[in-house]
Image: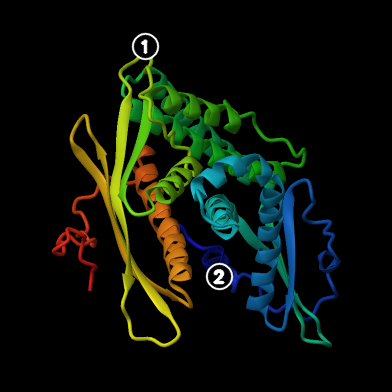
């Protein structure tokens, strides 16, 4: 389990709390003002903290070092946004930022484990505590370089597997793993540039845009997703489902791709039904509409069911038409995002096919005139 930055900082604070004795009977050290003749900037990356207590001062000093890495990663994340946006799919910018924060924690936490308390001082008049923490550049740089080498081997292995495989999903998933490791490598490499006095990192074996383009080419040549919908508002629901799938980078088409010299194409099918029912509810102000959807995602060639989405709800508004429009909007958003999440997770290898399917929510019974009975 990945440690949080706070846990890493507090662990280091507790581990070093007794390293120094009384610090209040000597003159103010130079590092309090940001410079230190004993710990040169060429050898150490330093952070200074000030607080009413020594543990708090040490924590703030660790935080000062952590912010150096976080700020650099934020500044250079523009190059990774195409991948991060794909990770978040149709999600909000907040969720994209959460993905970036997760990547940052993976690397920065590892770097912070090498930060040590170098000195501490208490002001004899004010009682304020000061702490100096430092990261030895050469030692941390060696550890990061070894990690980058490991990631490079993994990336090359995944790219090679994708080139040699004949199964479309194997090719896509191998490239996808390579992309994830490449983005993680860029975060580590950014940390390495912060640590090295020269500001230089190491050259990556591929560019993120290069692997993104390779995934798109494989998917266009070997994968097709078809969408078939019955019931009410089929055109509107179908458009919403297709837009959700396209945002995940999934190729939606009515034509089966020709495939490639490595193997046959794969066709995945999204089928479902959507229903809207006017509800006779004794309300003097509002009119109500109930909606329901039942969708199944399958691989027709293997007869494997990948997943299913069954949703339902009730919406109200001042008029029947406004209630129907509101129900349609919610149905589009809910169903399209969930279908896209399930199918993208399967194609990219992030999730396995569903072991059990949700029960159907749309009515199966009919009235005497043949029309479906609305759900209760």
The reply to whether discs 2 and 1 touch (Cβ–Cβ < 8 Å) is no
- For image coordinates 66% across by 71% down, the residue present is 58
In the picture, measured across the screen, residue 85 lies left or right of residue 171, that is: right
Q: Residues within 10 Å of mark 2 (few under 14, many from 20)?
A: some
Residue 227, picture quadrant: top left
The spot of residue 92 in percent (x, y) is 56, 57
Q: Residues within 10 Å of mark 1 (few under 14, many from 20)?
A: few
The spot of residue 288 in percent (x, y) is 38, 75
- Residue 261 is labelled as 1
In the picture, measured across the screen, residue 96 lies left or right of residue 296, that is: right
Residue sitting nearer the eye, 173 or 21? 173
Residue sitting nearer the eye, 279 or 301? 279
The spot of residue 124 in percent (x, y) is 81, 85
Q: How is the image coloured?
A: rainbow
The quarter of the rendered structure image containing the N terminus is: bottom left
- For image coordinates 73% across by 62% down, the residue present is 47
The spot of residue 114 in percent (x, y) is 59, 54
Q: Which residue is mark 2?
A: 10
Distance of label 2 from label 1 (alpha carbons): 56 Å
Residue sitting nearer the eye, 186 or 42? 186
Counting every numbered tag in the picture gives: 2
- For image coordinates 70% across by 79% down, the residue present is 22
Q: Nearer the viewer, mark 2 or mark 1?
A: 1
Q: Provide the secondary structure element on which disc 2 rests.
A: helix
Can residue 138 be seen here? The reply is: no
- For image coordinates 43% across by 53% down, the residue present is 337
Residue sitting nearer the eye, 149 or 315? 315
Please tell me whether residue 20 is drawn above or below residue 25 in the rendered image: above
The quarter of the rendered structure image containing the C terminus is: bottom left
Q: Provide the secondary structure element on which disc 1 rests.
A: loop
């Amino acid at each position: 389990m990945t440690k949080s930055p706070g846990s890493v900082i507090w662990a280091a604070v507790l581990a070093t709390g007794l390293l120094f004795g009384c610090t209040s009977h000597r003159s103010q050290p130079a590092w309090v003002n940001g410079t230190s003749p004993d710990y040169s900037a060429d050898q150490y990356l330093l952070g200074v903290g000030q607080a009413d207590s020594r543990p708090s001062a040490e924590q703030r000093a660790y935080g000062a070092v952590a912010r150096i890495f976080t700020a650099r990663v934020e500044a250079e994340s523009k190059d990774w946004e195409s991948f991060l946006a794909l990770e978040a799919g149709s999600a909000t910018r907040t969720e994209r930022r959460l993905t970036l924060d997760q990547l940052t924690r993976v690397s920065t936490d590892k770097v912070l484990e090498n930060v040590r308390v170098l000195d501490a001082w208490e002001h004899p008049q004010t009682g304020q505590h000061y702490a100096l923490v430092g990261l030895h550049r050469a030692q941390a740089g060696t550890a990061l370089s070894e990690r980058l080498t490991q990631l490079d081997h993994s990336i090359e292995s995944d790219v090679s597997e994708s080139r040699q495989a004949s199964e479309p999903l194997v090719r896509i998933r191998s490239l996808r793993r390579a992309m994830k490791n490449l983005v993680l490598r860029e975060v580590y490499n950014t940390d390495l540039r912060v640590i090295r006095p020269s500001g230089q990192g190491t050259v990556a074996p591929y560019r993120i845009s290069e692997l993104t383009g390779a995934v798109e080419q494989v998917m266009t040549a070997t994968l097709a997703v078809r969408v078939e919908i019955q019931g009410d508002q089929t055109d509107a629901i179908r458009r919403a489902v297709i837009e959700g799938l396209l945002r995940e980078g999934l190729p939606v088409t009515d034509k089966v791709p020709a495939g490639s010299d490595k193997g046959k194409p794969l066709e995945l099918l999204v089928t479902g039904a959507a229903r809207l029912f006017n509800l006779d509810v004794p309300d003097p102000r509002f009119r109500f509409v109930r909606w329901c959807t039942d969708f199944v995602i399958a691989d027709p060639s293997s007869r494997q069911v990948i997943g299913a989405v069954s949703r339902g709800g009730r919406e109200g508004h001042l008029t029947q038409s406004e209630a129907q429009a509101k129900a349609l909007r919610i149905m589009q958003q809910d169903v399209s995002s969930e279908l896209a999440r399930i199918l993208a997770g399967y194609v990219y290898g992030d999730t396995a096919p569903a072991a059990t399917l949700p029960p159907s929510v749309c009515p199966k019974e009919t009235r005497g005139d043949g029309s479906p009975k609305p759900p209760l």
